Image (cartoon, rainbow, N blue to C red):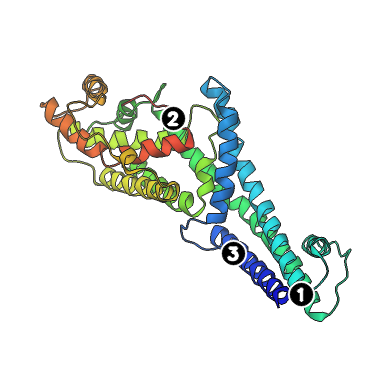
Amino acid sequence: MLYYALHALAFAAGVLLVILTLSAAIRSFVLPRNEVVKLNAYVFRALRTVFDLAASRHKTFSGRDRVQAHYAPVALVALPVVWLAVVAVGFTGIYWGMNEGDWLDCFQLSGSSLLTLGTHKTRGPIVTVFTFAEATLGLLLLTLLISYLPTIYQAFSRREMMVSRVELRAGAPPTASALLLWLHRRDVQAPDTAQWEAWEGWFMELEESHTSLPILSFFRSPQPGRSWVTTAALILDSAALLFSTSDGPHDQQAELTFKAGCLSINRIFRFFSDDIHTEPSELLPDNDPLDDPARTAFNEAYTTLTEGGLPLRANRDEAWQHYHELRSRYTTALEFLGRITMAPAVKDL
């Protein structure tokens, strides 16, 4: 009786492993919705621990950046390997539950079927059906990853194109005040609406791609000093600086971009913070404007904008209060995303 119970349990456990793996693959690459896939998360976290340990041996940011640049590609390649391994274990349990031999024989049959080697013969039509199903599933998992690699790298290319364009316009080192001056370079009364519209589209795509394909968040920019997180910070800081300091009506497109940026960054933040289970105390921003160290940087930016010829509101304290309130809408999210992606530091304002 115990013998049959163990075989039935092994068969059921094997079926469950296969179903969970197939579900993980579908939710990772087919389902157009942001979901945390636990199996993938375990793989990514384990590899991240290894890469963090290797990066900690380097004292410079460029050295750590070189190590972490390999993390996302390695994790992406490791994902189907883990999927196939789990499927192999699952079908091993299925074959053992169907009395196809001892554990070693069942594992060899599973590996032969999964890799389409055909080195082991089965005993009966039912087991043959399972071996064909396993071979089909193995090919399907690999095909899913291969077919989605172009999608991932196309999204990465579009993201990095905007990162590079913003860096060229934000000065060296990049600052929000320099980016804002560039936006108003032709006519201080006519901001570059088309550029704000392009950034709105970038934020919307950022949210979709970095939550439905979360590993994309960890693909690092080709240049060590660049990051999609710092680029988002530059754009949002520029908008907050514009709204808080300018004397006159605000550009409607800039307001839409700021709203899209805040929504996008906070949704990506919630996706990862829920997965990582961050302590609530780590997510609380500093809401006291009097103690905010960014006040000095704000004063410098205010002076820079004044010298650049932008019409600013006379009361600098009120401008600072408004800027601090606007910045509080996205600072916590950006700081969190900067930590988990090891983004380079960006000069305030």
Q: Is residue 230 left or right of residue 63?
A: left
**Disc 3/disc 1 C-alpha distance (Å):** 20 Å
Instruction: Looking at the picture, tell me which residue is in the foreground, 156 or 32.
Output: 32
How would you rate the neighbour count of disc 3 (Cα within 10 Å): few for under 14, some for 14-19, many for 20 or more? Answer: some
- CB atoms of marks 3 and 1 within 8 Å: no
Q: Nearer the viewer, mark 2 or mark 1?
A: 1
The amino acid pointed to by label 2 is Glu
At a point 30% along the width and 30% down the height, the residue shown is 180
Q: Quadrant of residue 142?
A: bottom right
Residue closer to the observer: 106 or 312: 106
Residue hosting label 2: 167
Residue 69 in sight: no
On residue 98, the disc is: 1
Pick whichever of labels 3 and 1 is earlier in the sequence.
Answer: 3
Q: Residue at x 76, y 69 (%)?
A: 96
Mark 3 belongs to which amino acid?
Leu
Secondary structure under tag 1 reads loop
Residue 62: percent from left, percent from top: 55, 23
Residue shown at the point (53%, 45%) measured from the top left: 216
Location of residue 260 in the rendering, given as x and y in whole percent from the top left corner = 33, 48
Q: Furthest-bottom residue in view?
A: 125
Identify residue type, mark 1: Met
Q: On the rendered structure, is 231 left or right of 246?
A: right
Residue located beneath label 3 in the image: 20
Measuring from the top left, give residue 245's x and y in whole percent.
19, 31
Earlier residue among tags 3 and 2: 3
Residue 165 position in % (x across, y down): 45, 34
User: Is residue 260 in view?
Assistant: yes
User: Does 28 appear above or below 127?
Assistant: above
In the structure shown, which secondary structural element does the residue marked by tag 2 occupy?
helix
Q: CA distance from mark 3 to mark 2?
A: 43 Å
